[in-house]
Amino acid sequence: MPDISTKKTVLVTGATGYIGRRLTQRLLEKSAVNVRLLVRNRNKVQLSIVDQVEICEGSTFDPQSLDNALAGVDTAFYLIHSMGTEDDYRNLDRLSADNFRESCIKAGVKKIIYLGGLGVKESASEHLLSRIETGEVLSSKPDQIETVWLRAGVIIGSGSASFEIIRNLCQKLPIMITPRWVRSRTQPIGINDVLSYLELSIDLTCKGNLVVDIGCEELSFQQMMQQAAEVMGLKRYLFPVPVLSPRLSSYWLILFTPIPFKLASALVEGLKSETLLQNDNAARFYPEVVPALFKKTVADAIHELEENQVLSRWCDSTGHQACDIKDFDNPEGAILRDTREVLFEKGESQAEVFQSVCRVGGPNGWFKYNFLWRLRGAMDKAVGGYGLNRGRRLNQELRLGDALDFWKVVDIKPGKRLLLYAQMKVPGQAWLEFDVQPDRLVQTAHFLPRGLWGRLYWYSVLPIHNFVFNDLAKTIVRSGGSR
Ligand SMILES: NC(=O)c1ccc[n+]([C@@H]2O[C@H](COP(=O)([O-])OP(=O)(O)OC[C@H]3O[C@@H](n4cnc5c(N)ncnc54)[C@H](OP(=O)(O)O)[C@@H]3O)[C@@H](O)[C@H]2O)c1
């Protein structure tokens, strides 16, 4: 092993997000660098890597935590955005980038590597504008710190939002009436190539700032759909019509894909205008990277799904200013509860029952009354929620922060406790807790109602809870024993 003191120290921010998780894994596998992570909640870092990285808790809105995380750092990755917050995310993003650049300069960091979006200001959507502004802020003091600003459009990888949209539409709809913008061209890129560009940027020598547009061949959304369908062995027909507005298209997307309205509209807005490479810096400065063609990137993503190797998904982070897990990992404040206890009577063990608990949801279903869970999911989707479409990342494993149908995993104690926080549209806050004790499973639905409507909701669903929750607890215990 190389001497730790001679290796560069690299800071990865956004290390619990879609790109950050994969980049961290890539750096650990392939790069001779010390990897430090800046995360808002250290428990979200996957257990398999905690011994190989340095973890700093903090936020770009907390300059003191930035100073701690950046001490001794040579290169810092900026993989953060605030989209998804209720507040004005463009302002937040500018502030976040400004704090980060200043702390980097103070700590003597040599280079910032940022991944933003592809496109030009004149035709940029609100989301893309914010990504451009972030790049401008980060690179605004070239005499004091160098910035490599990579710009990517649609990223194709297992669990990426764009890939999930394409995959779901292809699989669910043989014929599609589409808006005219499906013909505007873009240059997608596979996640593995994005990681290569990011990794190679650490040792890239260039003077001052560099903007690098990355992507593979030029394709319209229509061509991407048709090519992806071919890879999946399907034939799909798209008929562009002039009457579909972006808003209507976004509704269409939330109906047939797991993507929520806000993200769907951002993606639709982004696809309305052409997003093509504006420079050839990728080929000039990274000649060793030859971006894979679109069909290959789709095949790779499908392979990862089939092999149950999805490392990160678009829904890992929720973008809230305060981390979603920390705020919701304790249901003590709930005032209404439904508790079921099932004793282990047929030789079930605590470990087996916990394994059984961790199989709930996604393609595994909810053991019994799946049609009722699907109906609840459809109702949630109808009012703009996630529904059940997000499924689960892996069939056999749950990690803190994983989305699980319309829940989020907010606490997991191996062999003992699983706590899910409801991200469905509900008049209040709801949790589902599985506490596996040596001789029994205690399953509790906690609810903190919002006003009268919240209470009415709770009491009106009680009869359904009565048999759904009862049978859920029983079946979990019994299937634990029968494994
Ligand atoms: N994913 C794509 O398809 C795509 C395409 C083109 C460009 N990009 C660019 O790639 C970058 C990363 O995107 P992504 O998709 O990986 O995002 P993501 O999955 O939403 O993850 C965002 C990450 O940022 C963290 N974060 C947010 N606010 C923070 C703050 N104030 N302080 C510290 N950490 C904070 C989140 O932490 P928590 O886990 O605590 O929420 C999470 O780890 C963005 O600049 C994006 O524009 C992405």
Image (cartoon, grey):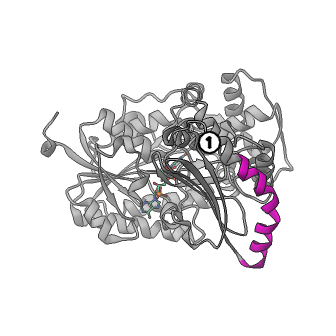
Q: Secondary structure at mark 1?
A: helix
- Give me the residue at 29% from left, 41% from top: 204
Can residue 185 be seen at all in this image of the molecule? Answer: no
| Residue 231 image offset from top left, x and y in percent | 66, 23
Foreground residue among 257 and 340: 340
| Residue 375 image offset from top left, x and y in percent | 81, 49
Left or right: 394 as drawn, with respect to 60: right
Location of the C terminus by quadrant is top right
Left or right: 118 as drawn, with respect to 461: left
Residue at the front extreme, as displayed? 345
* Residue that label 1 marks: 477
Foreground residue among 182 and 405: 405
Q: Is residue 52 above or below residue 418?
A: above
What type is the residue that disc 1 sits on? Val
Foreground residue among 148 and 22: 22
Residue 25 shown in magenta: no
Residue 457 shown in magenta: yes
